[in-house]
Amino acid sequence: GDTVACIGSTLIYSVPGLAGASYQWNVPPGWSVVSGSDSSILKVTVGNNAGTVIAHEQNSCANLQATLPVTTALPTIPGALTGNSEVCSGANSSPISLTGARGSVLEWLASTDGGLTYHGVNDTDYTYTAQDLTATTIYRALVQNGESCEVDTAAPVTIVVDPQSVGGSLSPAEMQFCIAQTKDALLTLGGETGTPVNWQASPDGVAWTDFNPVYADTSYEVSGLAANTQYRVVVKSGVCPVQSSAPARIDIVRTSFPQAAAEPADTLICYGTTATLNATITVATSFAWTAGASTLSNQGNGTINLLPYKIQATASPLKTTSYVLNMVNEGCPNPLKDTFLVRVLPPIVVDAGNDTAVVVNQPLQLHASSNDTTGDDTFNWSPPTGLNNPNISDPTGLYTVEDSIRYLITATSGTGCKGVTSILVKIYGTGPDIFVPNAFTPGAPTNNVFRPIPVGISKLAYFRVYNRWGQLVFSTTHVGDGWDGRVNGNIMDSGTYVWMVQGTTFNGRVVTHKGTMILVR
């Protein structure tokens, strides 16, 4: 067994076994026996005291005793590593130290994948110097205070490795800039490693001046330039030395940049309506609409003969559309582009149900709705004839004479957009009933669908058609539906068919009829 025992650990001590032997063990004071006190293998929990482990083994042939002096060791304390740092990739050096540990360093471990996997570093000192790292690395140390004590891992350190700074380049590398140009001169940094620290400007590419205040974006809109100028960006990656981007050269063109005032930049219209796009051009020799022109009227012919030049174009889009006005001043290579965004609301679709019929002095409940989800629509029924209130979605109609009225229903949303539909109401002088034709001619220009005509009926329970053998060929519960003379797409023969119909009047009375009709081809 171990001659150096770790305090608090569980260890095994043993002697060669003899047949039929009995055993007696003695352990140092403060130790406790876990198992095996009458066997050749003893399991103990180590106490604080050193001493001697004694085994007494006896059978009919032998009486043996063995002793093993044992010292004790305190449990391993892994401690912690110090030396968290940040370095630049390449030539670098980072010292790491183990502090607060009890025991020896068995091995150092390193991980470059965030601690998922580690590889061994052949070093057993309490200090280690990491050198020339190219990736962020986590370090740990394995510590053990004697062979019988457990191995433990010291709290780690992380050395963050920043990639080398790369300045990248500006795009475009060359640009012409017109007098009084205020837009469309954007420089963009690309291919860099790190983040911008500041931009710099130079008249000759030799003497560079930092932007003040500091500007640390990846793009810059050049404006107010009066002389040829070069620009570059200073880029820094972590703690690495800064690098400058490849410069961009801006050359002045001695011609004025186009100038114009345009409005509205963004407008909202209802479906089916128009928007007026206004522009007043004060510097330019020509213009063109380069987007959205197919839905524009009064857009002009592109020629400017007199300044200021005014445009009042009418946009008629059926969906959200961007209109781009492109203005050119001869001699200046850079056009001025103004964009008008016209956002189109969805069309208001109104539903007032199918055409219907009612009898004199019988109330008719009407109802209209729209697809507008805001819930703040208003409704108007025109003409108001027979309606208790023409300005609600569900008026009640009551009629005193036979007539035929087509109502136009207008729904107006909270934004002022409108949708229109219509419904035809036929008023009969008879009582509520269901009328069914006695013949129809499928495929003909008229009378080509066999359907019931409900008058004063609020609900259709069923309408069924049977052939001469009693087989059902058509059935519906919807007012307005009818049979076209086909079953599963197959044309039925001419002849006599039986029908049955049942509905409920607006007053709740059930109406039932049955009869025959002739299909004529």
Image (cartoon, grey):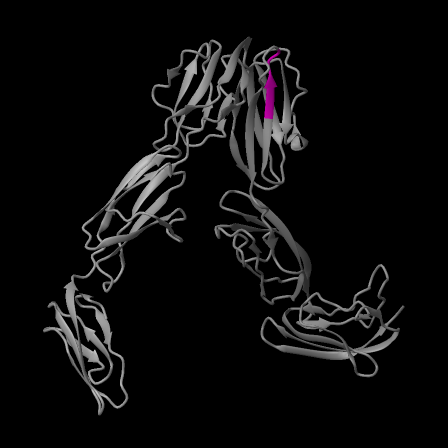
For the point 27% across and 60% down, the residue is: 151
Q: Residue at x 83, y 83 (%)?
A: 469
Asked whether residue 407 appears in the rendered view, the answer is no
Whether residue 138 sits left or right of residue 52 in the image: it is right
Instruction: Locate the N terminus and report the quarter of the image it occupies.
Output: bottom left
* Vertical comparison of 281 with 447: above or below: above
Name the residue located 52 percent from the left edge and 26 percent from the top edge.
263
Residue 402 quadrant: bottom right
Residue 249: image location, x then y, percent: 51, 15
Nearer the observer, 16 or 292: 16
Q: Which residues are magenta?
A: 325-330
Q: Quadrant of the C terminus?
A: bottom right
- Examine the structure image and report whether residue 326 is included in the region drawn in magenta: yes
Location of residue 214 in the rendering, given as x and y in whole percent from the top left corner: 35, 23
Front residue of 72 and 360: 72
188 to the left or right of 441: left
Q: Nearer the viewer, residue 212 or 408?
A: 212
Give the residue displayed 23% in from the left and 53% down from the top: 104
Quadrant position of residue 235: top left
Q: Most prominent secondary structure in the magenta stretch?
A: strand
Q: Nearer the viewer, residue 404 or 494?
A: 494
| Residue 354 sits above or below residue 509 on the image | above
Q: Is residue 406 above or below residue 244?
A: below
Is 6 magenta? The answer is no
The answer to whether residue 61 is left or right of residue 195 is left
The furthest residue to the front: 61
Rendering coords of residue 477 (x, y %): 67, 72
Q: Is residue 66 visible?
A: yes
> What x and y, as percent, mark residue 329?
59, 13
Q: Residue furthest bottom?
A: 60
